[in-house]
Structures are given as C-alpha cells and as structure tokens.
Amino acid sequence: MRIVLHVLIGMALVGCAGTNEPTSKTVSIDEWEPSSDILGIVVTPDEVIVPVGSSVQLEALGLNQERQTVELTDAVDWESGTPSVATVSNELSEEGQLFGVQAGTTTIYADFDGVQSAPARITVTEADLVRLSITPGSVTLGVGDALQLSAEASFSDGSSSTANGQVRWITGDGSVAVLNGDGMLTAEGLGVTQVHAEWKGIQSDPINVQIVEEVAQVDADLLINAVYGGIDDGTLEIIIDVQNVGSDPVGGFWVDVFLDPETTPEPGDFPDAYHMVDYVGAQSSTTVTFVASTPRDRHDFTILVDSLNAIGETDETNNRATGNTDGDVGSGGSDDPVALANLTFEYTGGFSTETETEYWIDVVNEGTVPAAPFYIDLFFDRMPTEEPEGDEDGDMWKFVPGLGAGETSYQTMVVDSECFECGTWLMIDGYDLVEESNESDNTAYVVLDGSFGPPTPPE
C-alpha cells in the first residue's frame, strides 16, 4: 500500500541529543512524570478522508526524550484550521472527535503545553464510499501475538484513504481472535476464523485468520529504496520511499530525519523529525514526506528507518540513507534509485457456457520493486471502441493486496451470462494506486477465441 504521510519538521527541531536505550513503551497521561518533557506530538491518523456528516476519532501521542510515547488525546487542545470544513472536539469524553461539515480540505493540530503537533491533513468529501478492502489478505499468528490490519476505503471520485478508525471491525469467533477499534488483531486461542470490515453499508471481503501455537520468525526486511530532498521558495521537502521486501507485514516503527548532522546518527539518537509508520504490507511500500519552512537554501540529511529495532529484520544493514536538497534522487537500499513497479497482463483467457462466462487473468509485475495493492476491473460485453477510462468501476473487480517484483497474480472472474462471441475489457489499477514505470499497458481487450490485447484500430 502506498500511503503518503505529511509531517512538519518544525515540530521536533531539537537536535541530536545523545544515545538512549531503544524503547517503544507507551505510557498513559496518568503514568507520565512531568520530568519526562514532551518534545513532539503526533496526530493519528495524520491524513484521512471523511465523508460529509461522518466522524473519525483522532489520537494525539506525545514523544519524550526516552522515546516513550505518551497518550495525550484527552490532554491536548485540539484546533481545526477551517471549522467550516471540519470541526474537532475538546468536550469531555469527546476529545479528538473529528466531524466532517462540508466538502473541502483543512488541517488539524493538537497543542500540549506550548508544543504543537504536525498538521493532520483532512479531506471532507461528498463522494460515495464504493469499496473497502483489508490488508493483509490472510493472517497466521501464534497465540498471544498481535498484528495491525489496514482497512482501505475507495470513493466514487477515485480517491482512497486508510480508514482503520472509521470502519467497524468484525471477527467471526472472538475466542480465536479479537479486534480493537483501530484494527489491531490479537490472537486469543487456537483455531480458524474470518475477519471483515463494514462502513456506511459497504462490507469488505473477509480475510482468513489462523491461530496456531507459535509461528516461525517473521520474514521482514525494511529498506530505503529512494530519498529525495528539495527546497522551493523557503519550503523544505524530504521524500522517503520505504519498502518491506519480506513476506510478512510489519508495523509500529519510526522513520527518523537528521538535518545537517555533525556526526553520523546512530540508532537511539533523537532525530530532528520523525514519524511512526503503523503498517506496511509484505512486498509493499510506504512513502513518507516531511515538509517544513527553512531560511536556508541547502540542507544535508540522514534517514534512519526502525532505529529502535522494533522489527526483527532479515537484513539490518539497509535502514540508513543520506541525501541533500539539491533535487537529486538518492538510493538507500536499491541499486536503481528510480525503480518502479510495472503491472501488465501476462495472460488472459477463459471459456463460456450457456449460463456463465469464466475469465482467467494473470497480472505480472515486470518492475524492479513491489507493487502496492490494486484492483483489476472487468467490463463485460463491450465494443473494442469502448475502452474504459481510469477511475471507472467495472461490472466486477478483484482486489490484489500487493505484488512483488517479478511475481504474478492469478485471478478468476465469473460472469453469470454467456459470452461466446462478445468482447470484454480488463483494466489494471484503474484507481492509480500503484506508481508505475509504464502506465500505457494496463488495459486489455479479450475475446474468448484465444486473442487478447489492445484492439486493432478500425480503418
């Protein structure tokens, strides 16, 4: 999944403050000691789409010098940049409750004792919710283990957003697995069940959850594929492409930025800016963008991913990258600094009977990096001249929860109608969820006589 996170660097310009023992402990405001000064505040989710008339619960987490996160939702002062678009509550028992008023965009801030959070970017939309999907597509956990699930909402205007705190999470058997309101799944007992999400009358496809005695060590590897830095009219922007090239999803790790460091930053050093990444699927990527004002015309920077070693990785040597704001794209963990995915059809086929038509669709990622989750849409019984456009919903669709470099996804779609001689269009990633090196090979025209591909233009 490609998630863009915007973080204001000015929230934590405190410099490098020595080495601390890595910790990911979260303490409540009741347990927090005033001597543990809050150095920065993170609002989650920090980018979200809210339909008009709907609400979502925001949370504020403070970060102190020891890298402990402090739950501050009920203690901060919440402020909306544009109350006519979205309001946020400071009322007792409703702190952080965001409400979409009218279509538009705004920012939300949380302030605690003079420390202001980075802005949470809010879009209020009048578009209809059309799809919900959950990643990962299946889960195997050991008893007592936990895993963050991610719910993706797609809207009729083509936009999409993580909706973990907006959906209703439902488990088939609470004795096997339970879920909290944000999609954190905890393994309770041995067995198999299914989990799905519901919101505004839309239900996701269920995912299978299997709980066993214990599971093998997680196969995960985070790497910095590419970094970019630039300054435009006093605005500093640093973009980091973080990939998980392992076969298991991970979450709960920090991305740290050190501006103009005098020495090489080490794990445990306190960064100038930071962000907690909640979830990255297997063979998926996350783009983290840091934005701030600066009076200077150039900066050097160092990026550290998972500096507190929250994730047990198969390779711990590719979590550092350096760059500058000269506008070049630099590489941390890949030899190709501008590597991209590329989705295309490897094979299409099928057959038709008097009552139904079955399509076989093989989609391959010919790129050199993993592809984010995407949809395959099928447009049944169309003319060759009726090629679908992006963001157009098919008569049916399949959700693919990511695809590794060089891998193929094998999908089957069945239409309850015969189609002996008619043609059908197929479209990959119509919602443009995947950044590709070639966007021109995502449609195919299928006639079930063995041919496929773009039609020959009429003479």
Image (spheres, grey):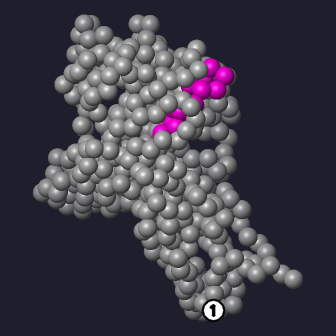
Note whether 37 is above or below 224 in the view shown.
above
Q: Residue at x 30, y 10 (%)?
A: 37
Identify which residue, 202 or 347, lies in the foreground: 347
Identify which residue, 434 or 221, lies in the foreground: 221
Identify which residue, 337 or 406, lies in the foreground: 337
User: Hey, what amino acid is under mark 1?
Assistant: Asp
Q: Residue at x 22, y 50 (%)?
A: 187
Q: Residue at x 50, y 54 (%)?
A: 339
| Position of residue 359 measured from the top left corner of the image (x, y, whole percent) | 55, 81
Magenta run includes residue 248: no
Q: Is residue 171 visible?
A: no
Q: Residue at x 64, y 75 (%)?
A: 444
Note whether 297 is above or below 4 in the view shown.
above
Q: With 370 as the anchor, is 51 left or right in this view?
A: right
Picture quarter with the C terminus: bottom right
- Circle 1 packing at 10 Å, graded few (<14), some (14-19), many (20+), is few
Which residue was labeled with disc 1?
Answer: 449
Q: With 364 as the anchor, is 219 left or right in this view?
A: left
Q: Is residue 398 visible?
A: yes
Magenta-colored segment: predominant secondary structure: strand
Magenta run includes residue 229: yes
| Residue segment shown in magenta | 227-239
Q: Quadrant of residue 316?
A: top left
